[in-house]
Amino acid sequence: MKNNVTIVGAGLAGSLCALYLSKKGYKVSVYERRGDLRSEMITAGKSINLALSERGLTALRKAGIENEILKIAIPMYKRIMHDYNGGLTEQFYGNEDQAIYSVSRAQLNVVMMKLAAQNGVNLYFNQKCTEVDFPNSKIVFANTITDTKSVVYSEFLVGGDGAFSAVRSEMVKKYGHEYSYNKIEHDYKELHIPAGQNGEFLLEKNALHIWPRGNFMLIALPNLDGSFTCTLFAAKKGLNSFEGLKSKKQVENYFSKIFPDFFKMVPDLYDQWTANPTSSLGIIKTFPWHIEDKAVLIGDSAHATVPFYGQGMNASLEDCRVLDELLEKNEKDLGKCFNEYSKIRKPNGDGLQALSLHNFIVMRDKTADPKFLLQKKIEQKFANTFPEKWIPLYSMVSFTNIPYSKAWSIGKKQEAIMQEIMKVPNIESKWEEEEIMLKILKAL
Ligand SMILES: Cc1cc2nc3c(=O)[nH]c(=O)nc-3n(C[C@H](O)[C@H](O)[C@H](O)COP(=O)(O)OP(=O)(O)OC[C@H]3O[C@@H](n4cnc5c(N)ncnc54)[C@H](O)[C@@H]3O)c2cc1C
C-alpha cells in the first residue's frame, strides 16, 4: 500500500479520481461536505441531468466503469428544435450513429461513489474542508452536523470541491494564485416535463430538445423514467428575462406564448417555478492548479464554466484521466507531475470556457437559423468525404479527445472558411456539388 491521499469533495471529479488513485495502490480518503447521496432518497427524474460525451466516456473506460455508467444513460443522437408554434426541425450531432448521453447527475455520482468504495476508498460525509496547511499536508474539516473539527494528514491532497472550492481559495489566499470569477448576464431555472400516463416519453426520447429564442432558450434532456429535465436560460433583466416572471399570470403567459408545446405538457408549471431556485452561472479561472508536490485541483475547482457545451463534467473527468497518465509517468516526482498537469490542463480549461460561451450563441440563436443548419450539413458532407482533413467543431469537442484548446483554434479557422462558402450565390441549391467541396479543400 502506498501513502495516504485525501480528496476534498465526493462529486463527479472527486469520486472518479478516488477510483483512479485507489487502483494505483494509494490509500484514498474522500471528505464530502454534503450527506451521503447513496443513502439519501434520490428520484432520478427530479435530479439535474448532464450530457456525457466521448471525453467523459474515455475517462470512465480507462477506470473500467464505462459499461456500468452506460446502463443508466440515454443516447441522444440529435438536437430537435421547437419553434414558436411547436413545429420541429432536427440536426444530427455527428453521423447518425454518434450520440451524446443523458445521465442523471445524482445517479452517476452514486454509482461512481459505490465503485470507489468497492475498490477500498474511504468516504466521509458531512465533512467540510475549512483550512489547508499545504507545507505540512494538513487539512482541517468541520463536521456540518456536530460542528466538531478534525485534522487530517496525507502525502498529498486533491481539491475536487467544485466551483466554490475551499482548497482553491486557500491556494489563492496563501500563495497569491491568479483567480477570477465572472458571472454571465443569464440565470437558469430547472423545470420538469412528466412522463405520460403509461410512463411514455412525451417528446422524442433519443434527442436533446431545444427551444431557441434568440437571446434565451429552454432545453430538455430525457430521464430513464420517461420524464425530461428542462432548463430555462434567460437574462436576469430586460425583455423576456427572469425579471418579468414573478406572478402566476406572468409565468403562464410567457410559457404559453413562447414555448406553447412545452406549456401544454407541464400542468404544475407555476408550482415548479416557485419551488425551484433561479441560479446564476459564471466562469472561474485560476492558475496554477497545484502547490508543489502537496496539492492539485481537478474539475470545477480549477475551471468551472457555463454549461452550454455540456462539457464541464466531461472536462472534469478528463482531468482525472490526464492526472492518472501523468502519475504513471512521474509517480516518483509528484512535484514534476503536478506542475506538468497544471501546464497541460490550464490552456484546455481556457479552451473549454471559450467553447462553452461560443456554444450558448449557437444553441439559443443559430440552431433556429436555416442557413446555420445548412452550413453544418455542408461541413458534415465535407468531413465525411475528407475525414482526415476536417472534423466539425462539435464532433471534435464531443466525439474525440482532441484537446479543447486545439479544437477551439481549429474551429475558428473552419468557421472563417465556412463564412466564405456560405457567401457563394445560390448555396442553398448547389451545396452538394463537387465545386463546393473543392472550394473548401482549396481554402484549407
Ligand atoms: C445547469 C448545469 C448544467 C450542466 N450540464 C452539463 C452537461 O450537460 N455536461 C457536462 O459535462 N457538464 C455539465 N455541467 C457541469 C457539471 O455539472 C460540472 O462541471 C461538474 O459537476 C463538475 O464536477 P466536480 O466534481 O468538479 O464538482 P461538483 O460536481 O460540484 O462536486 C464538488 C463536490 O465537492 C463538495 N464540496 C464543496 N465544497 C466542499 C468543502 N469545503 N469540503 C468538502 N466538500 C466540498 C460538494 O458538495 C460536491 O459534492 C452543468 C452544470 C450546470 C450548472
Image (tube, grey):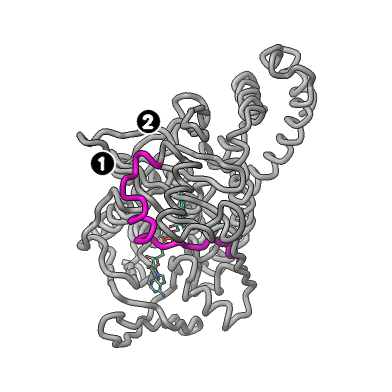
How packed is label 1: few (under 14 Cα within 10 Å), some, or many (20 or more)? some
Q: Using the image, determine if residue 55 lies above or below residue 324.
A: above
Q: Are marks 1 and 2 in contact (CB under 8 Å)?
A: no
Q: Residue at x 61, y 48 (%)?
A: 215
Q: Amino acid at mark 2?
A: Glu
The magenta region covers 263-285
Ligand 1 resides in the quarter of the picture at: bottom left
Looking at the picture, how far across and down is residue 209, in whole percent? 45, 37
How packed is label 2: few (under 14 Cα within 10 Å), some, or many (20 or more)? few
Task: Give the structural element (helix, strand or loop) at label 1.
Answer: loop
Looking at the picture, how far across and down is residue 310, in whole percent? 49, 47
Question: Does residue 58 appear left or right of residue 119 in this picture?
Answer: right
Question: Does residue 200 appear left or right of residue 59 in this picture?
Answer: left
Q: Amino acid at mark 1?
A: Asp
Quadrant in the picture for residue 142: bottom left
Q: Residue at x 43, y 44 (%)?
A: 51
Q: Residue at x 59, y 21 (%)?
A: 384
Q: Which mark is residue 225?
A: 1
Residue 325 visible in the picture: no
How far apart are labels 1 and 2 at the CA level? 14 Å
Task: Give the structural element (helix, strand or loop) at label 2.
Answer: loop
Q: Residue at x 63, y 56 (%)?
A: 350
| Of residues 74 and 9, the one drawn nearer to the viewer in this rendering | 74
Looking at the picture, how far across and down is residue 126, in whole percent? 29, 75
Residue annotated with mark 2:
204
Q: Using the image, determine if residue 26 lies above or below residue 129.
A: above
In reply to whether residue 274 is colored magenta, the answer given is yes
